[in-house]
Image (cartoon, rainbow, N blue to C red):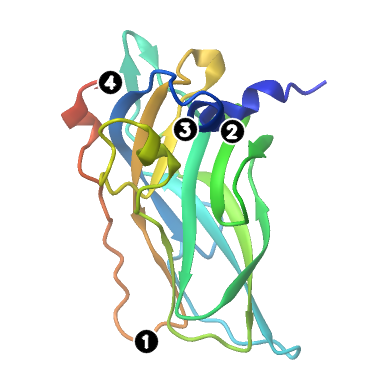
Amino acid sequence: MMRLAPVMTLAVLLVAAPALATNWCGENGVVRLSFMPGGELQAVHEADGSEKGVTMVDVYAYLTDFTPVQRKGEAFLGIGGLEMKLLIEGAEGFITSQEFPVANRSLGRKPGEIIAGFYPGIEVGTEPVELVHWTVLFQGTPENVVFRLDTADGLTAQRTDGLAGMGCSAYYTGMEQAGQLGDLFGAGGVSAYLNYEGEPDLQVRHSQLSWQQVGQYEAR
């Protein structure tokens, strides 16, 4: 029988027990939005409305550029909790599905707002790792649509000392079974562009402090 109790992870840290110690570890990795799954990430896409007068697109969030790290001889192997928020700008889009690659429990108020725990966790490494897959519907053929991750202070930043204004695109914790539930990392972000005129901005939006600057973990 699948254990569901531990999947609260980040949600427990932030909601049920905000007084729990959180070990801020800095930014490690970048969440890139893509219209394609797998290794061939695609941040720019053209799509026309179907005969039914709607446009459906798939949007994926991948953690990339992760540096394998360790602390006190213990490797950081996976994500036990995740917070991030997808913003859709330029047209009204409706998220019709939101899927995670592993068993999860989410306290997000609506699709696109993620405060989720995972069990046993999402393993991380040097290759891109899928975090979530959305299906988004638009009426007609939208133009100049930007998908991006919100860098405003969410629940994690509001309830963790020193994170106000950090500007992370996502926050994630380690896995409970690895004893790293309280270890909190941030991630940078790269937006995605649908039917976009002009030059898309595909630069990484980094937060203020990297894992090297914070110094809680070291490379392995």
Quarter of the image for the N terminus: give it. top right
Q: CA distance from mark 4 to mark 2?
A: 22 Å
Q: Residue at x 26, y 62 (%)?
A: 203
Query: Mark 1–mark 2 contact, CB under 8 Å?
Result: no
Which mark is in front, 1 or 2?
A: 2
Q: CA distance from mark 3 to mark 1?
A: 35 Å
Q: Earlier in the sequence, mark 1 or mark 2?
A: 2
Amino acid type indicated by mark 2 = Gly
Neighbourhood count class around disc 4 (C-alpha, 10 Å): few under 14, some 14–19, many 20 upward = many
Quarter of the image for the C terminus: give it. top left
- 59 in relation to 173, above or below: below
The residue beneath circle 4 is 217
Q: CA distance from mark 3 to mark 4?
A: 15 Å
State the SS at label 1.
loop
Could you say where residue 3 lies in the image, as x and y percent from the top left? 74, 21
Q: Earlier in the sequence, mark 4 or mark 1?
A: 1
Neighbourhood count class around disc 1 (C-alpha, 10 Å): few under 14, some 14–19, many 20 upward = few
Q: Residue at x 41, y 46 (%)?
A: 154
Neighbourhood count class around disc 3 (C-alpha, 10 Å): few under 14, some 14–19, many 20 upward = some
| Residue 122 placement, left or right of 152 | right
Towards the viewer: 153 or 72 = 153
Residue sitting at the far right: 1
Asked whether the viewer can see residue 127, the reply is no
Q: CA distance from mark 4 to mark 1?
A: 42 Å
Amino acid type indicated by mark 4 = Tyr
The residue beneath circle 2 is 117
